[in-house]
Amino acid sequence: NAGVMQNPRHLVRRRGQEARLRCSPMKGHSHVYWYRQLPEEGLKFMVYLQKENIIDESGMPKERFSAEFPKEGPSILRIQQVVRGDSAAYFCASSEGIFSGNTIYFGEGSWLTVV
Amino acid sequence: DAKTTQPPSMDCAEGRAANLPCNHSTISGNEYVYWYRQIHSQGPQYIIHGLKNNETNEMASLIITEDRKSSTLILPHATLRDTAVYYCIVRVAEYGNKLVFGAGTILRVKS
C-alpha cells in the first residue's frame, strides 16, 4: 500500500519563477494537508483540502501561494514569483476523514531551494 | 497554539526504554493524543495515538493517565535510529482536527 507520494523531492527555482509541488494521497484518502518547515524551524500548517474544495487555508500566505485538489489527479501547491524566504521543506499529508481518530500520514516532503 | 507541553530534549542509552512525557491538561473528552516523530530531513512519521486506553503497536506503547491530563510514549528498546524529534499532539475540533505541531522533544539515543 503506497504511502503519500510527493514530487519533486527537490526543486531549485530562481527568484521570480513559479514552483509547483505535487502530492498524491494514500489510496482511499480524500483529505489532504500541506505543511511548511522553514530551515531549523517547526512544522507549520498551511492548508487543508478535500476533493475540489479548500476547507481551511488559515496558514497560507495571503499572496503568491495557492493550493488545489482536483477531482482527478494529485493535489498541487503552487508558489508564484518565488523569493528566497520560500526556501523550505513542504510536506503533504493525507487522511481518510477529518475525525480526530482518523490518522494523518505524511509524505517525505519536497525541498524547495530558491536561488 | 499547541495544547501540549513536552521537555525540549532527552537522552537515552541504546537498548534501554525511552519514556517521553507529555502534558495536555486542557484536553477534552473526545480529543485524541497523537505521537509523531521526525528524523532529520524526513517527513513526520506516525507512531501511535489513543483516546483513553493505553495503546501498543509494533513501534511503541502509549500510556494515558486516567484523568487524561498527561501521557507517556514508551519506546521499549531504543536504537540509534530512534534519534529524532518526537511530537505529542492533541487533535482539537476547534482547529478543524488538523495537527498543530509544537516544538517537540529531541530524543538522543546514545551508544
Image: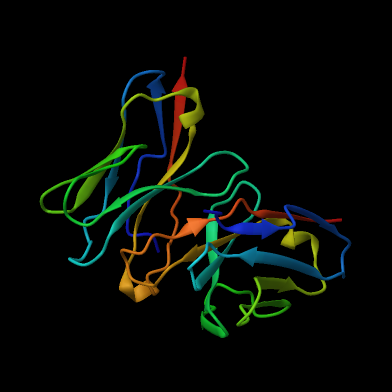
In the orientation shown, which residue stands out farthest toward the left?
B66
Instruction: Give x and y (percent) for residue A94.
Output: 50, 64
Q: Nearer the viewer, residue B47 or B109?
A: B47
Identified at 16% across, 50% down, the residue is B53
A52 displayed left or right of A29: right
A79 displayed left or right of A49: right
Identified at 82% across, 73% down, the residue is A81
Tell me if residue B27 comes above or below residue B10 in the rendering: below
Instruction: Give x and y (percent) for residue A108.
Output: 61, 50
A49 displayed left or right of B24: right
The quadrant in which the N terminus of chain B is found is bottom left
Task: Say how many tags the image has.
Answer: 0
Identified at 43% across, 46% down, the residue is B104
In the orientation shown, which residue stands out farthest toward the bottom?
A53
Tell me if residue B13 comes above or below residue A65 in the rendering: above
In the orientation shown, which residue stands out farthest toward the front?
A1
Tell me if residue A6 comes above or below residue B94 in the rendering: above
Tell me if residue A18 comes above or below residue A26 in the rendering: below
Q: Quadrant of residue A22?
A: bottom right
Instruction: Give x and y (percent) for residue B84.
Output: 49, 36
Q: How is the image coloured?
A: rainbow
Instruction: Give x and y (percent) for residue B15.
Output: 37, 18
Q: Nearer the viewer, residue A99 or B33?
A: A99
